[in-house]
Structures are given as structure tokens and as C-alpha cells.
Amino acid sequence: MFRVDLTQNRLSPLVQKRFADLHLRERDHLQEWLANQPDALGEELLIIQKEFDGFDETRERLDLLALDKDGNLVVIENKLDDSGRDVTWQALKYTAYVSSLTKTQIVDIYQQYLDRFCGGGNAVVRLCEFMGVEDLGEIVLNPGTDQRIVFIAANFRREVTATVLWLLSRGIQTQCFKVTPFMLGEELIIDIQQIIPTPEAADFMISMSNKDGEEKATHDTQKHRHKLRLAFWEEALEQLRADNVALYQNISPSKDHWLSAGSGVRSCPFNLIFSRDEARVELEMRRADVEENKWLYDRLHSEKDAIEAACGAQLDWRRMDDKKASKIIFAKPFDGYDRSNWPQMIAWLSTHIRKFEAAFREPLARFNPQNRSPNEENP
């Protein structure tokens, strides 16, 4: 790595170091860096445990255990200046151990991590947020044989790289990241590069080692769910347009469980929700300023009786003081994954989004935070 001196138009090399020379330790330093910044490995990962030792009849510990966006467990093994000879065998043992973990066990492991290292928190809520779902029941965690292995070291021995390449050829998702420390004066610089497979060759190697990947993906639970949602929203939008629901005239179908449309107030959309258990219409206040969300919610709540009378129903008012956003909701139970229920669900959504929009149109315009007096306080 080089430092660029723009005034002299010259390059000067950074000083490459060994971790040992810098008195840096695997557990205290490299592991902590990655636990707190897992996207340094080039993707969104959720660390769910470190120094995991939950193996029967063994005292062995794996360095970091993570989840990727597909719900796969990722075993991360860190070494410093040398990978050692036995790191692949060690990681394979750990991967075999965690391959049998159930969703309930994974949630428990993550909850223990939050309680011990992160000052608490709700593991189910955080998992849902990471996976982008409303209900943990919508996702599969640790599916089949899709566990992954990540090796991190400053240098990899030939026997390690040869083994990793062999694992890749057998369809086992394995990566090697080379981590190199540099000094820039008194500043420590860390370079992390994926070397196996190279980013350019990764897709090709995966496709070659998984000839049945396309067929398997067709039956994958998550992709099936995406197709189901897309089909539902295609039908729903067709009916909404037939019903002259102007809010959704220019909205496209989505694989997500929601469709949003503007309410006239920035970052306060009307949402249609399609889930396994219910259909829902809602007004969501998700502005960047939490105080603005609560202010607007409180103003609307002060006219609760009139709004509910206009909607013709009692609504679910959720101020959610522990979160940035607030919501006002009306929902009805349905078996959403039974396609025979879709016409009834769509008709219900069409009817109630029109009532919602009509009931909230005038108070939203009147209470728009953009028109709020700077000195106006919450009620």
C-alpha cells in the first residue's frame, strides 16, 4: 500500500508490519475488530456469538459465529501472522458442530451474546430487522448443508489454501481473507482482502461446484415466498387500479411483504401489508427525527375518535416509545398463504386503504411537521 503525496505528486510506501511486532493479539484485537465491523468482510453479517463453546463433550471454542442475509451460519476462524496447518480441520469440526443448530437454539445463542456483550436487547427483534422480515417464522435459519467457513490470517500455508480450494470444488462455501497491518506514522492501517476465491472468480467457482444450484434455488423457501408475494401484489394492484385507488396507481409489485404509498407528509407512508397470518393497512411515521414522529402521532391521537369514526373501526395505535417510528394500524386475520383467500384479502385491503386515506387526509395536512411552529411542544 502507498500513501499519495499530492503536493509532490509522489508515492511513498506504507510500512508493512507483523501483528506480533505490534504486540497485537488474535482474541483481544483482530476478533474484536471483526465482531464490531463484520462488513469488513465485504457483506452484511450479523455476529451472534464469539468464543462459542456450546459443543457437547468438548471445550473447544470457535472464534466468531455469524449469520448471513440468507440465514446461513458462518464460522469465522481468525489467525494472525500465520494460518497454521490445522486451521481447516479445526473449522470443519466447528462447522459440523453448528450444522445441527435449530432456529430456537440460534435465537438463544444470539440472546446470550446480546446479554453478555451488547448490554441486552431482544434477539428475535434484531434477527427480524437483519433479515428484513416482520415475523421470524417467515425465514429458515441454518438451512440444510449451507453452512459457510471464513478464514482470516496474514499468511496462508499452502496446505490450507489447497484444502480450501478442494472444499470449494465440493460445494462448501469457503473464503480466505488476507489481513495485513501497515503503519502510517503512529496510525495503524489494516488491509483486508479476499484472496480465495478471488472476487472476480467467486460466481464462476460457485456455479461450477453447484450444478444443481438452480434447481435447489427453485425450491428454496425464501425464494418461494418472494414469488408468492410478487404474485399477490400483482393481483392486488390490478384490483386497486380497477377500484380507482389513486394512492397505488404508480406503484409496482414487490417481493416484500409491504407496499408503500405517499400520504402527502414526507416519510409518513400508507402501507399495505400481506403476511402469512393477516392483511393490514397502516400509517407509518418514520421521519429521521424521532421527536417529529411522536409529535405527529400525538396530534393524530388527539383526534382518535373522529378518525376512527371516519374509518368505521377501532384502530391499533402504536406510539412505540422505544423505537424511532410510530404506527396506526388496522388488521384482519387471513391465511395469506392460501391463494383461495386472496380475492377476499385484496377486497379488504382496497376498501380499508380508501377509508384510511380519507380519514387521515385532512388531519395529516393540518399537522404536517413541515408547517409546525418551532416553539410548539408535544401535547
Image (cartoon, rainbow, N blue to C red):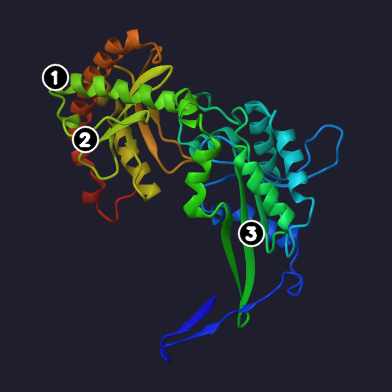
Mark-to-mark CA distance, 3 and 1: 54 Å
Residue hosting label 3 = 33
Give yes or no for contact between labels 2 and 1 (Cβ–Cβ under 8 Å): no
Mark 2 or 3: in front is 3
Residue 369, horizontal then vertical, whole percent: 26, 47
Residue 38 at least partly seen:
yes
Residue closer to the observer: 155 or 231:
155
Residue closer to the observer: 19 or 216:
216
| Amino acid type indicated by mark 3 | Trp
Residue hosting label 1 = 242
Quick one: label 2 or label 3, which is nearer the N terminus?
3
Residue hosting label 2 = 363
Q: Is residue 133 above or below residue 51?
A: above
Q: Secondary structure at mark 2?
A: helix
Mark 2 or 1: in front is 1
**What is the crowding at mark 3: few (fewer than 14 residues within 10 Å), some, or many (at least 20)?**
few
Q: Is residue 94 left or right of residue 322?
A: right
Residue 113, horizontal then vertical, whole percent: 68, 42
- The residue that appears at 55% across and 46% down in the rendered structure is 45
Residue closer to the observer: 41 or 327:
41
Residue 66 at least partly seen:
no
Q: Is residue 297 left or right of residue 144?
A: left
Quadrant where the C terminus lies? top left
- The residue that appears at 55% across and 27% down in the rendered structure is 140
